[in-house]
Image (cartoon, helix red, strand yellow):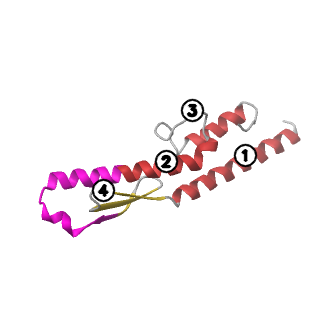
Amino acid sequence: MDTSLHLEMFGEYERMAEDVRSIQQRMAEIRATADSGDGLISATVGGAGELIELWLDPRIYRAPNSGALAQAITDTIHRAVELSQEEGFAIAAKFLPSGATAETADLRFDPFLHALDRQVAGGERQ
């Protein structure tokens, strides 16, 4: 293998690795919070959709309906996860193929795989 080609490929790898590290760090810093419609529940999730904090207003106990409470908590957490995914997608968008959406992209792997695809196709950044 030509030494200059080898150095060019290594340089591209270093840039790609730095891009991946940057995405990982920025996604780890995501905190997305959603509130229930009545304002009695608040959920905060991280960049991977993990629950970081759940806040329940004591007034939730005034209407003892465990099924409705469970559904409201679940819905609030799901909304927070959606907000987190949207923020993560915005961070990774330039590393994803055109047409990717927050709903369809796997933000853990797609940016890296797309960068590898570009490298195999000739190293062009799109």
For the residues bearing labels 1 and 4, Cβ distance under 8 angstroms: no
Task: For marks 2 and 1, give the CA distance.
Answer: 27 Å
The tag on residue 36 is 4
Q: Count residues near mark 2 (Cα–Cα under 10 Å), then give few for <14, some for 14-19, many for 20+.
A: some
Q: Secondary structure at mark 3?
A: loop
Residue at the extreme top: 121
Judging depth in this view, the residue of 79 and 14 nearest the camera is: 79
Discs 1/4, front: 4
Task: For marks 1 and 3, give the CA distance.
Answer: 25 Å
Residue at horizontal 57%, vertical 57%? 26
Q: Which residues are magenta?
A: 54-78
Residue at the extreme bottom: 58
| Residue 57: x %, y % from top left | 25, 67
Task: For marks 4 and 3, give the CA distance.
Answer: 31 Å
Q: Can you identify the residue that label 3 sits on?
A: 99
Q: Count residues near mark 3 (Cα–Cα under 10 Å), then give few for <14, some for 14-19, many for 20+.
A: few
Q: Is residue 80 magenta?
A: no
Left or right: where 40 falls relative to 102: left
Discs 2/1, front: 2
Q: Can you identify the residue that label 1 sits on?
A: 13
Q: Secondary structure at mark 2?
A: helix
Q: Can you identify the residue that label 2 sits on?
A: 86
